[in-house]
Amino acid sequence: MVDEKKLREKAKEVLARDDVRRLIGWKRGTYGYESAPVVIKDASEAEELIFDPTCVQNPASFITLEEKPPVPRGQEPDTRKVAVMVKGCDSRAVVQQLVEKAYPRDGVIVLGVPCTGVVDRRKAQKMFGDTSEPVLIKEEGDKFVFTIDGETKEGPRAELLADKCVRCRFPNPLVYDELVADEVAVWGADEFTDVDEFEKKSPEEKWKFWEEQFSKCIRCYSCRNVCPMCYCLECVVTKQRPQWTRRSTDVSENTAYHIQRAWHLSGRCIECGECERVCPVDIPIMTLNRKMTRDVKEMFSFEPGIDVEAEPLLSCYNPQDPEEYIM
Amino acid sequence: MSEEFEPNIVAFLCNWCSYAGADLAGTSRMHYLPNIKIIRVMCSGRVNPLFLVNALQQGADGVLISGCHPGDCHYLEGNFYARRRFMLMRKLLEHVGVDPGRVNMSWVSASEGAKFKEVIDETVAKAKEAGPMEQFRRRQLNW
């Protein structure tokens, strides 16, 4: 378990440095089973930082979201570093952003937080119901202990873990400058059984499933906005000239949007599961992403977000790439 | 009255090989099926996979992307990138429930007029088998 005192001290230490502009971490949420991401500029605010199984968000999403307006003449741009706290899965996003040269490696300070799994809000809501107060969650052995509205409740760890944590292979950050706790043992493995299960369906069944899911979509673009890999300044789905998808929310446009989103993440998705978490209408977005991850792994033996030195999948090629369907 | 279904195929042909191949098929007076609408692009690597989604939305029943043979690309490596992209895009569309026969790719060089004819025949046959593309075609074309 992460010692929060140590975490705060590390944060203060980093924020006190002259070359650090801000730190991104987690604080207690205002209600429910999730914490809130927080950007801290001053060491005195570091007391609100936490890390527990409510910290499901991916702070790596916020590194690239910062607006960099043109600087007035005579002024220098702020080149100080951004510090970010990452779990194992979040660190893969940092790796992939570094691979894509979203920012230089010495522009960020990565504080690694080894993680033993976070709670899925939807699963917890199903088990314990909703609440308007922030919930405290502690991990004790193979149980999560919840403090909901002053009452203590227990739930089995295996049933409450987020899907990404059940199959987590990287609980320890892959890239970091400092670790705030000791590394933890790996417990998960990823066999892509869910993808195989889905592939057994016939094309008609698949389309029936997706038609139902995509027609729910209200095109709020939350999945795009929260994604750590979606940081283009101008996104193709909101572009007007040329307009690739119209803004109406019918099945055709929604399908095109979701195909575009999954396509732009193929070979880049690091499976933090944020898109699915924020979806207000519960579309299983990760089903598409995981299919792409599996295929990329099978066809090109490539996995995004592992190696900082790797070349992005679609900006390189291998003359021996598969081409069995090409006439 | 039942008419046989005639698919619409959008073909993206590269300027240097496949388009010349199609030209050769024409000048050699070979009969290939009239279902294809050719769009000339400078390289198969220029074809964005979103073109394909857009074509399917706007009423195409099948798409063909054709370029130079690997190693013969006018721009040296454009077709290698295209191969990777469409391999993935095809799998993605298959996952959503689109018949993979709607997405075709071929290598046709400038001297392969006869091969071009075969490719078109096969593409049209596959699209006929898959039937009309009804899944995510735009319902309101002029809004």
Image (spheres, rainbow, N blue to C red):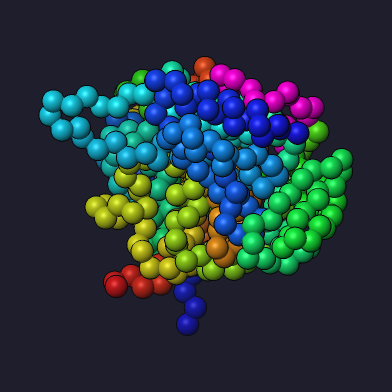
Q: Is residue A236 above or below residue B77?
A: below
Q: Position of residue A265 (x, y in %)?
A: 50, 41
Q: Quadrant of the N terminus of chain A?
A: top right
Return the residue found at the far left: A73
Considering depth in this image, is A188 or B30 the residue closer to the camera? Answer: A188
Per the image, is A182 magenta? yes
Which image quarter: residue B107? top left
**Secondary structure character of the magenta stretch overall:** loop
Q: Residue at x 46, y 40 (%)?
A: A39
Left/right of residue B112 with respect to residue A217 in the rendered view: left
Q: Nearer the viewer, residue A147 or A281?
A: A147
The answer to whether B100 appears left or right of A254 in the picture is right
For this view, does B80 lie left or right of residue A182?
A: left
Residue A78 at x, y percent in the picture:
30, 27
Residue drawn at 63 percent across, 44 percent down: A55
Q: Residue B100: in sight, yes or no?
A: no
Residue extent of the magenta highlight: A168-186
Where is residue A139? Give x, y as percent: 79, 43
Could you tell whether A128 is left or right of B34 in the image? right
Looking at the image, which residue is at 85% across and 47% down? A143
Classify A52 as above or below A98: below
Closer-to-camera residue (A139/A171): A139
A100 within the magenta span: no
Is residue B27 visible to us here? yes
User: Residue B103: percent from the left, percent from the top?
Assistant: 50, 48
- Choose between A55 and A4: the one closer to the eye: A4
Q: Quadrant of residue A75?
A: top left
Query: Which corner quadrant of the image does residue B57 belong to?
Result: bottom left
Q: Residue furthest bottom?
A: B1
